[in-house]
Amino acid sequence: MIPAIEQLCEAVRAAVPDAVLEIIPSTPAAAQPALLVDGAHVVAVAKYLRDDPSCRLDFCSCVTGVDYLAKGSIEVVYHLYSVALKHGPVVLKVRAPRDLDQCRVPSLTPVWRGCEFQEREAFDLYGVKFDGHPDLRRILMWDGFQDFPMRKDYVPPADYEWEPTPHDEVLKRAKAGGGIMPPSAAVEVKK
Amino acid sequence: MIDDGLKSELQKHGVFVVSTEWLYNWGRKSSIWPLQFGLACCAIEMIAAAAARYDLARFGAEVFRATPRQADLMIVAGTVTKKMAPQVVRLFNQMPEPKYVIAMGACAISGGPFKDGYNVLKGVDRYIPVDVHIPGCPPRPEALLHAIITLQEKITGQHIDRTRWYDAKATTEFPIPVFGEHDLVPAANPEVWQPPKDYRDVTNAEVKKPA
């Protein structure tokens, strides 16, 4: 049985004394309490969680990002399980600023090999740069793509066509004009 | 032209009189070889249509070819992502004329439930000319059979001397979109696709009279 999050936090604090830890309690939206770790010590904490005999969290099942536009931060969330001891999940979170050049967290791929593709996905969609990742490049979108589409301030390309009953967002775009016809195609038509 | 009475009379004696065009189209429509090419769950329905229960072989369209060079028909079965779109257009360009396209399912027609997504093409007809659209999510195998029959009817009605592919000036190559910084460039091929007009801008004179 995995220790309760408070005991786990104390154990981590004892093992990695410098780490800045915070327990994020469970909410209706996130049913699991989470352990927020500062970026500088997350690798040490991850290694402890993986190697400690009572934790043995040997499997990272999910890596994703969460964009907090109002708070100006992006959170990277790791879901950890133990296959050996059949327990989990433990939710590990790291925060980084939203600004693209400062949005960096250490990669946990050296700790859990399975993080590689999922960290690439988080980089592709949220623009989080993982320091120490062996092969950080886009995985879903193409290489020349400039945007990070899961960020909340992402503006999708104006490739909508007119709809028979425009409403809501599409109606706004229709009234604003320009968003209905792809701009590049519109230039072609005018020739 | 031979009149129908004489034709029928000759048929009773085992003599079939048809035009070259009829024979040519009959041969083509009875052996539409599709490209073996599936993109999403619609492909599962396409596989079911080709298998024993629905038996696409009854219509001569069971020979799925693994190369575009031997295919007559591209069944776009599923969601075309923007990353996949250039490959779809390239495969279509590699098919020899005469060639046809069936857009199978909501995604291939318009992007379907993913239309609002940043990564899905809002209809494959933005880059290649589509002959038959099948609505459905996914369409049942019967719907695909109906599309094949509809395509056969279209082929039957084509005239050899007026077909696109015997026109020396006609293009059979469609421009392949390239990956841009924010979207595919161009976002549509205006020669094959134009956005529908706002009904408020369509004048009465422009409304097509039914044939």
Image: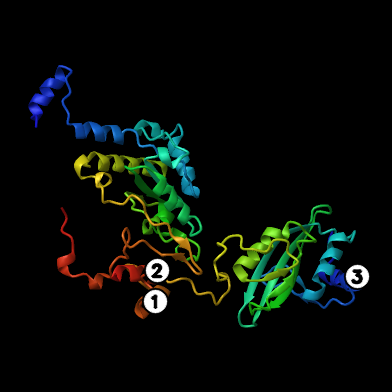
**Are the residues flagged by discs 2 and 3 from a single subunit?**
yes
Mark 2 element type? loop
Q: Count the marks: how many?
A: 3
Which of pointers 2 and 3 indicates the residue nearer the eye?
2
User: Along the polypeptide, which appears first: circle 2 or circle 1?
Assistant: 2
Q: Chain of mark 3?
A: A
CA distance for labels 3 and 1: 55 Å
Which residue is tagged 1? A173
Q: Amino acid at mark 1?
A: Arg
Q: Position of residue B161 (x, y in %)?
A: 19, 42
Mark 3 element type? helix
The quarter of the picture where residue A22 lies is bottom right
Q: Amino acid at mark 3?
A: Ala
The quarter of the picture where residue A28 lies is bottom right
Q: Nearer the viewer, residue B119 or A29?
A: B119
The image's mark for residue A15 is: 3
CA distance for labels 2 and 1: 9 Å
Identified at 72% across, 60% down, the residue is: A115
Identified at 15% across, 21% down, the residue is: B11
Q: Nearer the viewer, residue A26 or A143?
A: A143
Q: Is residue B35 visible?
A: no
Direction from residue B29 to residue B90 in the image, left or right: right
Identified at 35% across, 37% down, the residue is: B32
Where does the N terminus of chain B fall, quadrant-wise?
top left
Crowd tier of the residue under label 2, counting other residues whose Cα lies within 10 Å: few below 14, some 14–19, many 20 or above: many
Which residue is tagged 2? A160
CA distance for labels 2 and 3: 54 Å
